[in-house]
Amino acid sequence: MMDHILIRGLRVKAGVGLESWERSIQQMVWIDVDAAVTTTLAIERDHIQHTADYAAICESIKLWLVHYRCDLLEHLADALAQHILKTFAIEHLTLTIWKKGVVQQAEAVGVKIERKSSNILVANGN
């Protein structure tokens, strides 16, 4: 059975931005994760080992972002999606990353991407 694990509004610091001041700091980003996972065993056995652990996903994202730097949210989203798909038993992932205070007229700007674990494995030769 395929269901979705949802994480909304995860607040973490990331090194992302085009401007020199953005690259010199870790700035707050907001992340939404919609992860398609097989939940049959989790439903039957009622145990966390049979599904994607929300807390583990959040902690993994936070720790991974500590050392990652790039210019574009698009690049960050793709690299983070690959990390999540390689680390957890997730078949399909929709990932949204938002930054606030970048465009004066907008509350936030961001990107939304979709990735499949099968594409990640093929792309990396695994």
Image (tube, helix red, strand yellow):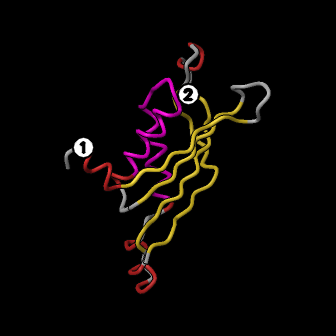
Q: Amino acid at mark 2?
A: Gln
Residue 103 is situated, as x and y percent measured from the top left of the image, at: 72, 25
Q: Magenta span: helix, strand or loop, mainly? A: helix
Horizontally, is 22 left or right of 2 in the view?
A: right
User: In the figure, residue 11 lies in which quadrant?
Assistant: top right
The residue labelled by disc 2 is 26
Residue 70, magenta (yes or no): yes
Instruction: Estimate the spatial distance between the alpha carbons at disc 2 and disc 1, rounded to whole Å.
Output: 29 Å
Q: Amino acid at mark 1?
A: Asn
Q: Residue furthest bottom?
A: 44
Q: Is residue 52 above or below residue 121?
A: below
Helix, strand or loop status at disc 2: loop
Kindly identify the residue that appears in the image at 48 percent across and 50 percent down. 114
Question: 60 or 94, which is in the foreground?
Answer: 94
Kindly identify the residue that appears in the image at 55 percent across and 19 percent down. 18
Q: Name the front one of labels 2 and 1.
A: 1
